[in-house]
Image (cartoon, coloured by chain):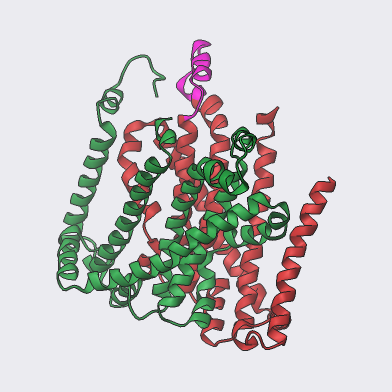
Chain colours: A green, B red
Amino acid sequence: MAINASKSLGDRLSEAPNARTWIGGVSVVLFLAAWQVIGANEIVRSDLISYPGEIAAAAYDLASSGELGANALTTLREFAQGFAPAILAGILLGLGFALSRLARSLFEPLFVAMYTAPLIAFVPLLVVWFGVGSTSKAVTTFLAAVVPIAINTTTGVRETQESWVRALRAFGATRGQIIVKAILPGAMPIIMAGLRLAIGRAIVGVIAAEMYVSTSGVGRMIQTYSTAGRAAEIFVLVGEVSGFGFMCVWLLRRLENRLAPWRARA
Amino acid sequence: MNEKFAQVALGALGFILLIGAWELAARNGLANPVVVSSPARIAAAFARQWASGDLFADLETSAIEFAIGYGLAIVVGVVLGLAMGLNRIAEYCIDPFIWFIYASPLIAFYPLLIVWLGFGFVTVVTVAFLLSFVSIAINAMAGVHAVDASHMRAVLAFGGTRRDVIFKVILPSSVPHILAGARIGLGRALHGVVLGEMFGSNDGLGYSITRYAAQLKTADVFVPLLTLIVLGVAINQASALLEGRLQSWKRA
């Protein structure tokens, strides 16, 4: 914010190379240090806030006992079982909505209603329908993910350049070729944005569904350690879930650069 | 106008088709009405919950929790976002924490929140606040970053102070961004209320859903669930309208 002509110390600091990374890093380190001092010295009850040293120890214990790995695998499987079909169904539904006015008019309001409603409210019902096991979690993931993917596919396809479609048609392309060669690649960046939204919703959905009722999984672990009042373990598990989310978004970005390289250059 | 009417009519037809198919399936034994319920059963459950006052009491609790949580989120989100937008050091310091709060499944902390804040009302308000303030803050910050520098230079050139720049240029021109963030925050706040009520309260629409589900009263589950869906859509539509109204100068 270069409003003042003379540069203050703050301006000079914030304009240093990589300022965002190292100022952010220093801020996080200071926060962790303060947390460690406050928690380890019981200035605030450490069973309520824990502290970084204890959390690191808990992470080591959970990982080395294999408890974390086994439960993470369960959650991952449920996530994959719901998310993979959601990608397919979302893109097909989105294409259907974009290419058929009738389908869009009839069913898009239902979809938008589903999108606005808090997904977690459906979980108790899904448990009644699909049981306390993995299926209800996969269905939760599916429902969380399919709606943003479908909505974004519709938007993306409708914003595809009309001229590309006309060019292909002029050269005698079939409807199928037009969809594969022009419409889907054109819509790719927006579909990818939909996938990013979907990942966030699906992760929260699967964890909350496991917390609500389940027999295994990371959400189940959170619930177990929660009721036992173990703050350190909860921080480990929350950190793991966030890490998984970051990893997914990072992978998606790399995939996007591969699938839509013209966009990365822009 | 005619076009718009057709859209609404077809949308309504979509809902009617769904309800009709559901009712038929339940009546003809294609779907077990005890498990999946049916529109007629849901209507009866709605009438029952309405008459007993349960539905209204739940709605009132949830609405108050939502209003307080979301209201706090707007105040804190706007102030924090503007501070981050105006001061780059503040932005860099707060940024990692903001993203952690945004990306992590905060509901996992509910048992700790209950110990800190007590079971029920305050915990629910806090979950709603935590889920929604970040999107408002991020957008407010983006709004400040997007301010047209020539406007700021103009104010300074005519002898305006830094204060003038903030109140006469930066604040007004970040309004569209703040509104967009506030709209994203709405959905997240409603989500937070439901999450908080399901896990950390024994009151409100979210709690009713879990209670009726535990009793396997599926028709009764649908009443608070549908109320939430309608509420979500209504809030979203209202905010879209308001957003259009407040930004009317932008199109001119």
- Residue span colored magenta: B146-165
Q: Specify the farthest residue to the front.
A: A172
Query: In terms of depth relative to the viewer, which is nearer, B186 or B116?
Result: B186
Query: In terms of depth relative to the viewer, which is nearer, A103 or B173?
Result: A103
Q: Residue at x 60, y 64 (%)?
A: B63
The quadrant of the image that shows the C terminus of chain A is: top left
Asked if A183 appears above or below A138 in the picture, the reply is above
Asked if A240 appears above or below B29 in the picture, the reply is above
Query: In terms of depth relative to the viewer, which is nearer, A19 or B166?
Result: A19
Q: Residue at x 40, y 35 (%)?
A: A264
Query: In terms of depth relative to the viewer, which is nearer, A57 or B93?
Result: A57
Percent x, y for residue B139?
48, 41
Percent x, y for residue B158?
53, 11
Q: What is the chief secondary structure element of the magenta stretch? A: helix
The mark tally for this picture is 0
- Residue A13 falls inside the magenta stretch: no
* Res. B122 in view: no
Percent x, y for residue A230?
25, 72
Q: Is residue B193 left or right of residue B105?
A: right
Percent x, y for residue A113?
63, 61
Q: Specify the farthest residue to the right.
A: B2
Instruction: Quadrant for residue A134, please give it.
Output: bottom left
Instruction: Quadrant for residue A218, please give it.
Output: bottom left
- Residue B164 falls inside the magenta stretch: yes
